[in-house]
């Protein structure tokens, strides 16, 4: 039986991932901030053994305890998905350091505070799979979301180093670079053909984590789009409203 830890389990994508693992008969431990939403996700995993715990990952000093309790509950963690994040308010982050710091804490610092004890646990056991949901926004700074993108870009670099560190111990680390997904987090965004649905994204996440893929664009079409975005010269980039606009 595979023991699966999902941090940020109440997000739309993470809830779908939980259901996939439940259908396999895996043992699940779900952690999130809202107890009612957690209970709803657990109910969708009927038939599997599921435990839950509430936590606010923004309280950085408590995150090592969150991991310790999760490990105690499961016995050991075979698969872990870190799925929490928030776009924040870009305009507010340009005027207030407190707002900028909150975005950076949610999307980078809090993730690192969870990864340190998680990686140490799996390294000691010499096995395990870690997946971290990030964003294509981390591949290039754009005016519409560059504070969020900076956090995700820093996370990409951190995960590169962590992946190489853990390689010798047999632990895989998968960077999950998601394009826009039709979820409550993007409820105020105009939905285009580039938006994906949570169920399809979840299937891709489970598949690439099963394969031990190092970095994956989800859906795969972003692996064709983002190299072009990254390599566009800045002088040209700034003149293209669909890239540089708000």
Image: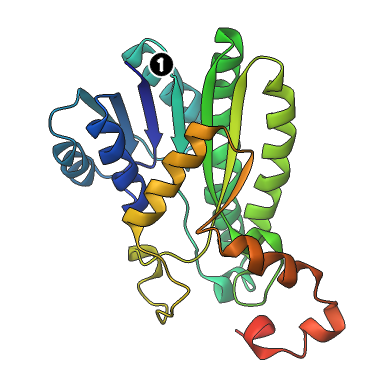
Residue 87 image offset from top left, x and y in percent = 50, 63
- Tell me the SS state at disc 1: helix
Which of the 4 image quadrants contains residue 220? bottom right
Mark 1 surroundings: few (<14), some (14-19) or many (≥20) residues within 10 A: some
Residue 34 image offset from top left, x and y in percent = 26, 45
Residue 177 image offset from top left, x and y in percent = 57, 53
Q: Residue at x 43, y 71 (%)?
A: 195
- In the rendered view, tell whether residue 184 sits above or below residue 201: below
Residue 7 image offset from top left, x and y in percent = 40, 36
Which of the 4 image quadrants contains residue 174? top right
Which of the 4 image quadrants contains residue 241? bottom right
- In the rendered view, tell whether residue 97 sits above or below residue 51: below
Q: Is residue 43 left or right of residue 230?
A: left
Q: Is residue 82 left or right of residue 183?
A: right
Q: Residue at x 36, y 35 (%)?
A: 55
- In the rendered view, tell whether residue 27 sits above or below residue 8: above
């Amino acid at each position: 039986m595979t023991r699966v830890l999902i941090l940020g389990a109440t997000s739309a994508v993470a809830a779908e991932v939980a259901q996939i693992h439940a259908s396999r008969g895996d043992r699940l431990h779900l952690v999130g901030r809202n107890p009612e939403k957690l209970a709803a996700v657990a109910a969708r995993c009927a038939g599997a053994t599921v435990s839950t715990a509430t936590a606010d990952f923004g309280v950085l000093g408590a995150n090592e305890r969150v991991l310790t309790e999760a490990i105690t509950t499961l016995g050991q963690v075979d698969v872990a998905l870190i799925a929490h994040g928030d776009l924040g308010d870009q305009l507010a982050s340009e005027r207030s350091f407190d707002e900028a710091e909150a975005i950076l804490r949610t999307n980078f610092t809090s993730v690192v505070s969870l990864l340190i004890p998680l990686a140490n646990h799996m390294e000691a056991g010499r096995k395990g799979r870690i997946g971290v949901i990030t964003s294509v926004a981390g591949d290039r700074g754009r005016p519409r979301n560059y504070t969020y993108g900076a956090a995700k870009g820093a996370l990409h670099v951190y995960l590169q180093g962590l992946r190489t560190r853990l390689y010798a111990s047999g632990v895989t680390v998968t960077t999950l670079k998601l394009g826009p997904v039709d979820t409550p987090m993007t409820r105020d965004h105009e939905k285009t053909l580039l938006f994906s649905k949570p169920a399809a994204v979840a299937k891709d996440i489970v598949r690439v984590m099963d394969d031990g893929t190092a970095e994956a664009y989800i859906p795969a079409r972003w692996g064709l789009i983002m190299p072009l975005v990254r390599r566009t010269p800045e002088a040209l980039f700034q003149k293209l409203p669909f890239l540089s606009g708000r």
